[in-house]
C-alpha cells in the first residue's frame, strides 16, 4: 500500500467561499474538504499526484474555483492538474470560457456535467459537439460524467469528436445496485472502439452502495473494462470525497488494488499512474 500512485479524480470544495447547490442533498459530505483532509483520511496511503476535477459550483464561480485550486497547489504540490468547468453549449460563451482557461498553468481538461440532463441525447446538440471539438483544438481533454442510460449518445459523441481526448468518468456509472450490466457492457465495448476515449476506474463503490464492499461484487465490471479498454486506457480515481458516501478512501484504494492485482506490474503501474500522466499531460512529481 505504500506504492506511489496518481489519483485521477479528486474534488475539493469550501462552501464558505462559493456555493455548491448539490451539496444540500448530501449533508454527510457538505463540509469543506481540502488537500490536508485527503492526506489525513488516506491514512498513510495518500496519492503522490492528484487531478482535481471541477466540483459543480455555481457556474459564475467556475473560474474562481480554478484560481482557488491553483492557490491550494502552492501548498499541496501533489495537485498536478485541473479539469475545469466550461459550458459546452453556449456558443460564443463557450469560446470565451475556453480561452480564459487556456492560459491557466494547471488546467488540462474541461468538464460539463451531462448526467443530470433529462434528454438522453443532450450531448449531441450541435452547440455541445462544437464545444467538445473546440476543446481538442485547444489541446484540452473533455471529461464525460454520464449515467449508463446516456452512454448510447456518448458513443456517438466520441465518434463525432475524434480530435478530442475524452475521459469517461466512473466507468459510465453502471447499474451496480441492481447488478444489471446490460446494455452497459455493449455500450462500453462500442465506446472502447473509439481510440480517443479512456476510462476511469472510479465511482464504482458509490454506484453500488455501502452494502457492496466485497471486491468480488465488482469483478464482472472490472473484467469488462480490462477486456474492452485494456490496461493502457484505464485510470484509477477515487472520486473523493464523494466516495465517502459508500466507503473510506483507503477501503476503495485497497479494493481497486485487489481487483487489479492479477495484472502484470507494468499494467498496474499504468492504471495507477502512467496513464493519467499521459492523458492529462502531468509533469513528473
Image: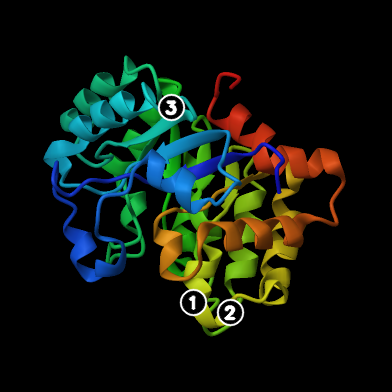
Q: Residue at x 73, y 70 (%)?
A: 219
Question: Around disc 3, counting alpha carbons within 10 Å, would you say few (fewer than 14), some (14 to 19), or many (20 or more)?
Answer: many
Disc 2 to disc 3: CB gap under 8 Å: no
Is disc 2 placed on a helix, strand or loop?
Answer: helix
Disc 1 to disc 2: CB gap under 8 Å: yes
On the image, the x and y values in percent for residue 95 come to 24, 26
Residue under label 3, please give it: 140
Residue under label 2, please give it: 212
Q: CA distance from mark 1 to mark 3?
A: 33 Å
**Residue 26 in sight here:** no
- The image shows residue 207, relative to residue 110, as above or below, that is below
Q: CA distance from mark 2 to mark 3?
A: 35 Å
Left of 88 or right of it: where is 190? right
Question: Around disc 1, counting alpha carbons within 10 Å, would you say few (fewer than 14), some (14 to 19), or many (20 or more)?
Answer: some
Q: Return the disc, 2 or 3, that comes first in the chain's sequence.
A: 3
On the image, the x and y values in percent for residue 173 come to 50, 65
Q: Residue at x 65, y 36 (%)?
A: 273
Left of 284 or right of it: where is 77? left
Q: Residue at x 32, y 14 (%)?
A: 103
Mark identifier at residue 209: 1
Amino acid at each position: 500500500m505504500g506504492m506511489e500512485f496518481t489519483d485521477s479524480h479528486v474534488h475539493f470544495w469550501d462552501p464558505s467561499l462559493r456555493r455548491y447547490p448539490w451539496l444540500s442533498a448530501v449533508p454527510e459530505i457538505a463540509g469543506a474538504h481540502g488537500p490536508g483532509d485527503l492526506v489525513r483520511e488516506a491514512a498513510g496511503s495518500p496519492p503522490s499526484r492528484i487531478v482535481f476535477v471541477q466540483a459543480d459550483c455555481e457556474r459564475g464561480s467556475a473560474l474562481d474555483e480554478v484560481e482557488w485550486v491553483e492557490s491550494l497547489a502552492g501548498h499541496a504540490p501533489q495537485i498536478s492538474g485541473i479539469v475545469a468547468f466550461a459550458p459546452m453549449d453556449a456558443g460564443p460563451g463557450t469560446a470565451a470560457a475556453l480561452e480564459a482557461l487556456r492560459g491557466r498553468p494547471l488546467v488540462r481538461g474541461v468538464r460539463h456535467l451531462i448526467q443530470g440532463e433529462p434528454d438522453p441525447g443532450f450531448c449531441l446538440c450541435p452547440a455541445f459537439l462544437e464545444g467538445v471539438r473546440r476543446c481538442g483544438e485547444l489541446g484540452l481533454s473533455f471529461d464525460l460524467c454520464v449515467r449508463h442510460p446516456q452512454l448510447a449518445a456518448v458513443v456517438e459523441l466520441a465518434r463525432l469528436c475524434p480530435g478530442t481526448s475524452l475521459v469517461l468518468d466512473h466507468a459510465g456509472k453502471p447499474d451496480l445496485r441492481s447488478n444489471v450490466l446490460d446494455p452497459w457492457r455493449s455500450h462500453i465495448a462500442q465506446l472502447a472502439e473509439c481510440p480517443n476515449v479512456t476510462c476511469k476506474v472510479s465511482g464504482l463503490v458509490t454506484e453500488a452502495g455501502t452494502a457492496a464492499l466485497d471486491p468480488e461484487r465488482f469483478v464482472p465490471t472490472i473484467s469488462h473494462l480490462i477486456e474492452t479498454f485494456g490496461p493502457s486506457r484505464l485510470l484509477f480515481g477515487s472520486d473523493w470525497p464523494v466516495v465517502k458516501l459508500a466507503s473510506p478512501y483507503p477501503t476503495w484504494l485497497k479494493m481497486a488494488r485487489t481487483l487489479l492485482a492479477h495484472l502484470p506490474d507494468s499494467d498496474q503501474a499504468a492504471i495507477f499512474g502512467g496513464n493519467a500522466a499521459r492523458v492529462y499531460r502531468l509533469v513528473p512529481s
